[in-house]
Amino acid sequence: MKTRTRNLLAVLTITLLFTACASEKQLEEIIQQSEEEETTNWEESTHPEEPVVALPGLPDDVAGYTHWLKLNAEPIPPVAGGDPHNGTKNVYVNQTRDTIAPNGTQQFPYPDGSIVVKDATRPGKDYIGLIAIMRKTAGTDPDHNDWKFIEYVRNAADAEFSVIAQDRVCWECHAQVEDIDYVFTELE
């Protein structure tokens, strides 16, 4: 309230000072600008940006992954006969489209520092029950193009994720797509 009163007084003062030498149009512009600033300040104070936090049990470096570049255009349905990541899936990467597809076509390998996150909603459930993460760090595992793999699961929407598999368990399957840098889902 004090800020609003102070802004109104400032506008009135400016109006009085410039009345003699400013046109009516200039005065209207000054008042409009002051009102816009006041609206912006009010919106910022009443709608602060919420902090991005990782889902319970997941590492902080994947917090907000759903805001990253999504590789698949449509959710990936469960594979008939089952698959290791059973459920409806989405795959995200912490890179920009320009970085991984500079000319509109995805380039391989992924750059060092890339993190790929696959989430899956299990059949008959309404929450994400699986998170599979691939992290690329130069020199960590040259035999698998420097990818580290880890998979988390949970059995309830309010449960914490826990590790179910990592590295060696994942290598055999992902080796099938070594030519596209071990990531099954390509950018669409």
Image (cartoon, helix red, strand yellow):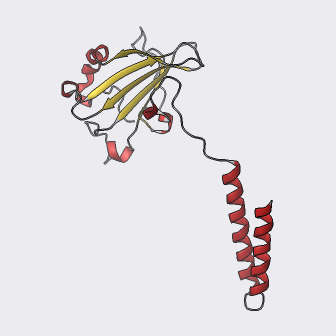
Q: Residue 119, position in %: x, y?
A: 47, 24
In the figure, is residue 123 to the left or right of 91? right
Percent x, y of residue 77: 47, 20
Please give left or right for residue 186 compared with residue 5 in the image.
left
The total of numbered circles placed on residues is: 0
State the quadrant of the N terminus: bottom right
Rendered location of residue 49, percent (x, y): 60, 45
User: Residue at (22%, 29%) from the top-left corner?
Assistant: 145
Which residue is drawn at the image coordinates 57% and 40% (left, top)?
A: 51
31 vs 71: above or below:
below
For the residue pair 185 and 8, the one nearer the viewer reads as: 8
Residue at (49% x, 34% y) in the render: 63
Residue lying at the far front of the rendered structure:
2
Q: Is residue 106 above or below residue 159?
A: below
Image-quadrant location for residue 23: bottom right
The answer to whether one can see residue 101 in this image is no
